[in-house]
Image: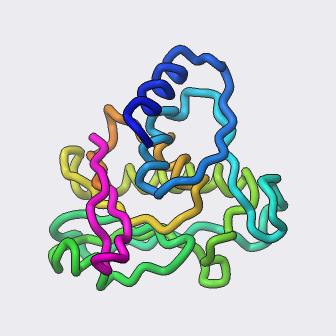
Amino acid sequence: MSEELLLLLEYRIEEQNPAHFSVFAFAPMPLLIQLGTLFTDKIDVDVYQPIREPKTWKWQQFPDGFDFVVKRPNTIKGVPALVISLSDKISYDRIFSVLGEDVSIWELTVEDKFIGNDNIRSQAQLSLFRTNIRELMVLIKEQHGFGTPLSIFPTMAVSCSIEMGRVRMPKADMPWVIYDQNNEVGKFIEALTIT
């Protein structure tokens, strides 16, 4: 997103003009998370998800048996990292190659049968995602401290990326260092920091 576009969007959000936003977005996950931080959860926003099968933006039924799974580190040591494995599984070795071995990995995922790029199909799933992210942020902050930066490694739907940014509480949450997979170098690289 260009700086001009971000400033225009930020102005419209602050002025709440329009008073309601419908968001249909495509962009890299770090930028979508940053976009969500501009909206916050105080603005009236409906976030939509492109669904591949059937090809639509219209919400579908809640998938039977779907739930999010939180995996905590066995021991708390070193820097915290949050892995969000929803669209694909992220091997912890990929995190160690970026942050080193002295890291506490927290993970938000789903059962294997729900891993994939078309797994967010209903608004209720987004609500459940927001609830889980909020609770997870509190747990991580309690274990690692408010001032400790949290490294985030996401593979998730565009709608989840935006909603993750929306639930961020700037005065209460840790700084976020968001990573993105760079295929040219073959690993995650630091994309942006949200303080």
Left or right? Give the position of 148 relative to 188.
left
Which residue is painted at 60% across and 78% down in the image? 115
Quarter of the rendering occupied by the N terminus = top left
Left or right? Give the position of 56 relative to 6.
right
Q: Is residue 166 magenta?
A: no
Which residue is painted at 48% across and 54% down in the image? 133
Which residue is painted at 22% across and 56% down in the image? 144
Q: Main secondary structure of the magenta part?
A: strand
Return the x and y of residue 113 as percentages of the image width and height: 66, 83
Quarter of the rendering occupied by the C terminus = top left
The residues colored magenta run: 178-195
**Count of numbered circles in the view:** 0
Which residue is painted at 68% across and 70% down in the image? 118
Return the x and y of residue 65 as percentages of the image width and height: 74, 73
The quadrant in which residue 2 appears is: top left
Q: Is residue 5 above or below residue 123?
A: above
For the residue pair 166 and 21, the one nearer the viewer reads as 21
Return the x and y of residue 135 as percentages of the image width and height: 46, 52
Q: How is the image coloured?
A: rainbow
